Amino acid sequence: MTTIRALVFDFDGLICDTESSAFETARAIYREHGVELTLAQWQHRIGTSGRPWYADLEAAVGPLANRDELVERRRLAHTAQVRSQAAEPGVEQFVADAARRGLLLAVASSSSAGWVREHLARLGLLDHFTVLSCAGGGVPTKPDPAVYLRAVEQLGVDPRDAVAFEDAPHGIAAAKAAGLWCIAVPNRLTGDLDLSAADAVVPSFTALTVEGLDGLVAR
């Protein structure tokens, strides 16, 4: 019998739709150079690190003489858009319900701790989370399981007693490799990806209840 003691959430694209802005601001700069950035190209980057966002642009047009300027302009545009984003549907209620029921909550993210903390605070969710386990400082990004292993260790729970929530394959792979149950909650950029490695897939947090988690992961 599964006894769920902790919930561990991805951040980007799950708690807040930062992924759409990341894609759209990059695509705008590609189009300035006469190149179309496809969603399929972008999906490989979601939830992990690797090739920089401008790599496919330089592959098409050659080295960018003003690369630093473009990187900063895109960063500012992306940051401004994200700061206007609300939490994804159902997230605030679900997190509040989980905290009220005494479950331990953590974030496991490939983004920096500063980024995650800023936006959780902006959304009014930061105080619900005991642990923020983020990549950086020698901790690798997903699909490496390190951020999940550190999250459950700092929460003091067995991975088998924790449920991860993810929106993309890299995150699902990380959670499962760390031994957690995993529920996939796709967003508009990841809905057509293969999320079958998750234990369950739901359309949004509005379709989830805290009391229903045991039955969902035990299917």
Image (spheres, rainbow, N blue to C red):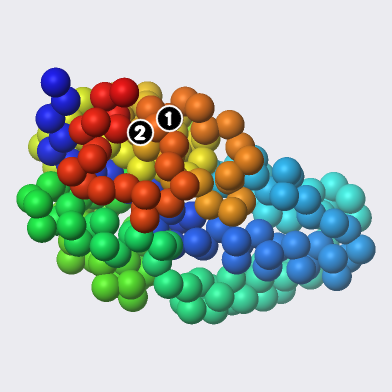
Could you give the CA–CA distance between mark 2 and mark 1, rounded to whole angstroms? 5 Å
- Residue of label 2: 182
Q: At x 26% / y 66%, what residue is drawn?
A: 125
| Residue 42 sits above or below residue 84 on the image | above
**Whole-percent x and y of residue 60?**
89, 50
Q: At x 83% / y 53%, what residue is drawn?
A: 58
Q: Secondary structure at mark 2?
A: strand
Q: How busy is the neighbourhood of tag 1: few (under 14 within 10 Å), some, or many (20 plus)?
A: many
* Furthest-top residue in this view: 1
Q: At x 79% / y 54%, what residue is drawn?
A: 37
Residue type at mark 1 is: Ala
| Residue 36 sits above or below residue 179 on the image | below
Q: Is residue 11 visible?
A: no
**Whole-percent x and y of residue 172?**
44, 34
Task: Name the quarter where the C terminus is drawn.
Answer: top left
Does residue 142 appear left or right of residue 49 in this picture?
left
**Whole-percent x and y of residue 209?**
26, 48
Q: Secondary structure at mark 1?
A: loop
- Residue of label 1: 198
- Which label was assigned to residue 121? none
Asked whether 94 or 53 is in front, the reply is 94
Residue type at mark 2 is: Cys
Q: Are marks 2 and 1 in contact (CB under 8 Å)?
A: yes
Q: How busy is the neighbourhood of tag 2: few (under 14 within 10 Å), some, or many (20 plus)?
A: many
Total numbered labels: 2
Q: Is residue 126 visible?
A: yes
Asked whether 66 or 150 is in front, the reply is 150
Q: At x 58% / y 44%, what residue is drawn?
A: 191
**Whole-percent x and y of residue 155?**
14, 42
